[in-house]
Amino acid sequence: MTTSKRVQDRSKNKGVHDLEIATEKHKVVSKVLFLMEMMKKEPEMIIPVRSLDQHWRQINLPKPHSIVDFIRKSPKLFELYKDQKRVLWCGMTKEAEVLLEEEERLISERSGTAAEYVTRMLMMSVDKRLPLDKIAHFRREFGLPVDFRSKWVHEYPQHFKVVKSPDEVDYLKLVERNPAWAITELEKAVFGVSESACHTPGSYLSPYADAPGLQAGSNEFDKRAIAVMHELLSFTMEKRLVTDHLTHFRQEFVMPQKLMRLLLKHLGIFYVFERGKRFSVFLTGAYEGAELIQKCPLSTGSVEGKGPKPYCSEDEGIPMQLDQEEAISELEAIAVGDSSFMDIYEIDNEYKPRDSF
């Protein structure tokens, strides 16, 4: 049995094919939002199409689709017209402008929650600081404003501050640890722990516990890494991330090198889906079918239905083709007969605290 076949069989056993459909929907929405952000930066929120062509790689349209084709499939959001010199321009419709205004309002209202999540990320990091460039990878997923580097990070001096390293790299550094925030989203959901309650480490291996005493490769090391990944995914609006964004933080969050292998060993908690050259990871418990159970007001749902349909038919199915070298090498390390999926509610029994840290 091939590695890809094993993973596909596991996925079918968990009934999470709907999450692959959710990925396809999100990818289309993310392209729409990228274009909207590009136009928002322009003085009159219009831009020459040839300028958008320069970002073809970031938009990542599947061949042979062009940016013009994509825009024309989104008539509720974008408009195309030519000026007197026959230059093709793209602008947003009134409906798109209203959506942008609503997004700005929601980001502003949710700013305090985003500050809490960023602070908790810093609390989980081994040095209580993270490079600003790496946090930028989570900007949209966390609902952070476009100007978060220049302005937003300075609005919460009681929680964090910007510092420079000796090599002139900008870091966001924790100012003060908040014990009330050292309660994971999992503890709140499973154990009914409230933010006002004191954090008791008797429930499972907390990602907010110090990690230096843990040895790489040990069960405790892996368990803490799973708790960190669960917490990070819980912070996101869609309860999903591109795995590249997680691997960027291996060192800061003390996570294993073979992160993909760890995710795939726990398909009851996480679901990994590969499309093209990128992998996405979901919190399976946060979804019912292809829909989020608890939708954030800032989630991409407001844009869905106004852009193009996904470039893959839902009826055809979306095979998981794990043919990337890293994924294959890590999957091969998982025993063929290993079918020990861990459900989210089994963590209480599995993730016990250790006195070694």
Image (cartoon, rainbow, N blue to C red):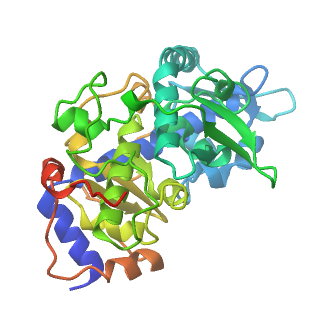
Q: Quadrant of residue 273?
A: bottom left
Residue 152, picture quadrant: top right
Front one among 342 and 329: 342
Q: Position of residue 302 (x, y in %)?
A: 41, 24
190 is higher (above) or lower (below) than 250: above
- Counting from the top left corner in percent of width and height, residue 159 is at 57, 27
Seen as rendered, the residue at the extreme bottom is 1
The reply to whether residue 320 is in sight is no
Q: Residue furthest right?
A: 85
Q: Is residue 182 above or below residue 269?
A: above
> Which residue shows up at 55% across the image and 42% down it?
70
Q: Position of residue 332 (x, y in %)?
A: 32, 83
**Looking at the rendering, in which quadrant would you find the N terminus?**
bottom left
The image quadrant where one finds the C terminus is bottom left
How many numbered dots are placed on residues in this image? 0
On screen, residue 338 versus residue 55, left or right, reads: left
Residue extending farthest front: 355
Residue 178 or residue 38, whichever sits in front: 178
Horizontally, residue 338 falls left or right of residue 279, namely left
Q: 291 and 339: which one is in front?
A: 339
Residue 113: horizontal and vertical position, in percent? Answer: 45, 24
Q: Tell me the residue at 40%/70% (across/down).
A: 215
Residue drawn where x is 58% and y is 46% of the image: 137
Q: Is residue 199 something that shows in the picture?
A: yes
Q: Nearer the viewer, residue 289 or 113?
A: 113
